Image (cartoon, coloured by chain):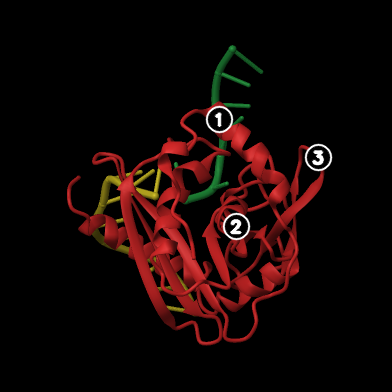
Chain colours: A red, B green, C yellow
Amino acid sequence: MITPIDLAAWPGTEAAALAEQQRLRPLVDPHGPAPARGALVAGVDVAYDDERDLVAAAAVLLDLDTLEVVEQATAVGRVAFPYLPGLLAFRELPAVVDALARLTRRPDLVVCDGYGLAHPRRLGLASHLGVLTGLATLGVAKTAFTFTSTDPAPERGAWTPLVDPADGTEVGRALRTRTGVKPVFVSVGHRIGLSEAVDCVLALTPAYRLPETTRRADSLCRRALAEAAAP
DNA sequence: GCGACAG
DNA sequence: ATCTTGTCGC
């Protein structure tokens, strides 16, 4: 079962958040198998309404083989942390974990919108979510943040290393999910290897640049936010 | 010091 | 993230 986050103990300052990242970082497991056939893959995403101080998260569970939606859940709450680059997890995760906790089945993998190990301190929101819940996770981001990569070959499936210029570490891959379209940036979250993560992302992108999990979660959380009652 | 910076 | 219409192209 997935336990919701206790907001009373959630970091309230940048310093506390940095200390929490330092505590969780050694708990990340950057290896693991690809999900088996028939696995259930969850997509999560969040939408904001700063005017009303509301955040809405969605978790959509898909069958990895058919990409059909098996189950979905949403959660609406107050914004728990400001947006600060490198600390995105503290803003997004409380609502995301609430939405995941409302699923009746445990995902075999969670696909996040953002980074995992591709993070200045190697604890992006995908890795953070994995450590918090014990779930296997990976991150798919639309931009390269502070990392560098060369442009992959134009064919779908082509990739190049995503490198942290600060120390030369390979932190993920720039992956072409559609021929002739901008790549996405894939990194390991928790309990999955990098090539396994890339294979999964390709399996989840039969038609569009972004994974079906992300696309489904994105539209669902926007709808949940629009339909949310005033606080 | 200043700007850039996942969403 | 979010503010936002039409339009070009497969």
Which label belongs to residue A130? 2
Residue occupying image coordinates x 68% and y 74%: A199
Do labels 1 and 3 touch, CB within 8 Å?
A: no
Q: Callout 2, which amino acid?
A: Gly
Image coords of residue A78 (percent x, y): 32, 43
Residue where numbered disc 1 is placed: A16
Q: Callout 1, which amino acid?
A: Ala
Badge 3: chain ID: A
Instruction: Kindly report the distance in space between the C-alpha atoms of the residues bearing marks 3 and 2.
Output: 24 Å
Direction from residue A47 to residue B2 in the image, left or right: right
Which of the pair A24/B2 is nearer the observer? Answer: A24
Badge 2: chain ID: A
Residue where numbered disc 3 is placed: A167
Image coords of residue A207 (percent x, y): 51, 78
Badge 1: chain ID: A
Which label belongs to residue A192? none
Q: Check disc 3 and report its element: helix, strand or loop.
A: loop
Quadrant of the rendered structure where residue A24 is?
A: top right
Image coords of residue A175 (percent x, y): 66, 64
Kindly give the residue lying farthest to the left in the view shown. Answer: A230
Quadrant of the rendered structure where residue A35 is?
A: bottom right
Residue occupying image coordinates x 47% and y 38%: A10
Do labels 1 and 2 touch, CB within 8 Å?
A: no
Q: Earlier in the sequence, mark 1 or mark 3?
A: 1
Residue occupying image coordinates x 57% and y 27%: A15
Q: Earlier in the sequence, mark 1 or mark 2?
A: 1
Which of the pair A189/A1 is nearer the observer? Answer: A1
